[in-house]
């Protein structure tokens, strides 16, 4: 691809580059470059803020290894399908996002970056990789399949959930939120029953890290500056709020 075309793509896709070979490059000043094609995702480092995350990561999750066998749901910005990853016989949820829709691109970058940096953290849905299919113009994000549905689904059936059941569930969710706020400097901003999934073991997980289009203009975004700044959560939350969160994290729900 010649230089003039690359400049046009840079202007058009903001933090994206699309190569002739069918690879999408997601660019992040703090965390490097994420290369996504039909064979999977590779993270290449570029002076990350947190040196512990500086190693290159590769997620081999190819489009031809997936067999889709049903829809899970759809929203304003994506479609989610159920699929089986043939090499390891694992059922996954594929969240498909169109990269050519301008309003979705920042959401995609935020979600990929957050999931890639915290693929298996307690209380957060597990990340298994991503791939890009040029013919569809979609990036598919492969996530842990939560077979119990959402907390909203449970509430529609049960109407209420008792405190002894909720307490250990929310302790895990608070650990996940604490990690997002304190380590990744990200405020989810859309915590609601629909975004809290549960598996059949009763384990809760937070999903949907792309959220609002205004996130990039807020101090609540993932810090994307080469020089570390104070955590936005410490600037914008009261001492009382921190005391409440710490008390919740230290509670043992089994004793309630």
Image: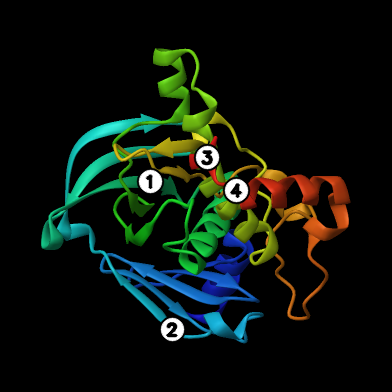
Residue at the image position 65 percent from the left and 76 percent from the top: 29
Identify the disc placed on residue 255. Answer: 3
Residue nearest the viewer, comparing 93 with 133: 93
Is 113 situated above or below 196?
A: below
Q: CA distance from mark 4 to mark 2?
A: 29 Å
Q: Image check: 224 left or right of 99?
A: right
Identify the disc placed on residue 174. Answer: 4
Residue highlighted by disc 2: 56
Residue at the image position 34 percent from the left and 60 percent from the top: 132
Q: CA distance from mark 2 to mark 3?
A: 42 Å
Element marked by disc 1: strand
Render colour scheme? rainbow
Do the CB atoms of the residues marked 1 and 3 lie less than 8 Å apart?
no
Residue nearest the viewer, comparing 5 with 72: 72
Where residue 254 appears, x then y in whole percent?
Answer: 48, 41
- Which label sits in the foreground, 1 or 4? 4
- Which label sits in the foreground, 4 or 3? 3
Q: CA distance from mark 1 to mark 2?
A: 24 Å
Element marked by disc 2: loop
Do the CB atoms of the residues marked 1 and 2 lie less than 8 Å apart?
no
Where residue 20 appears, x then y in whole percent?
Answer: 37, 72
């Amino acid at each position: 691809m010649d230089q003039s075309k690359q400049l046009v793509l840079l202007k058009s896709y903001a933090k994206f580059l699309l190569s002739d070979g069918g690879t999408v490059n997601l660019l992040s000043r703090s965390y490097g470059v994420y290369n996504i094609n039909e064979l999977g995702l590779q993270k290449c480092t570029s002076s990350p803020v947190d040196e512990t995350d500086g190693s290159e990561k590769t997620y081999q999750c190819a489009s031809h290894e997936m067999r889709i066998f049903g829809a899970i749901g759809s929203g304003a910005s994506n479609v989610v399908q159920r699929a089986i990853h043939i090499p390891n016989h694992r059922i996954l949820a594929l969240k498909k996002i169109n990269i050519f829709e301008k309003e979705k691109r920042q959401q995609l970058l935020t979600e990929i970056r957050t999931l890639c940096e915290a693929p298996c953290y307690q209380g957060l849905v597990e990340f298994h990789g991503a791939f890009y299919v040029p013919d569809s113009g979609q990036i598919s994000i492969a996530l842990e399949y939560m077979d119990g549905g959402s907390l909203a689904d449970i509430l529609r059936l049960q109407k209420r959930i008792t405190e002894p059941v909720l307490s250990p569930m929310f302790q895990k969710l608070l650990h996940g939120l604490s990690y997002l706020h304190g380590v990744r400097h990200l405020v989810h901003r859309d915590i609601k029953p629909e975004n809290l999934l549960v598996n059949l073991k009763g384990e809760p997980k937070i999903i949907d890290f792309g959220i609002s289009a205004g996130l990039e203009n807020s101090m609540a975004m993932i810090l994307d500056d080469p020089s570390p700044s104070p955590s936005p959560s410490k600037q914008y939350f009261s001492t009382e709020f921190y005391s409440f969160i710490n008390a919740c994290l230290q509670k043992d729900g089994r004793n309630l």
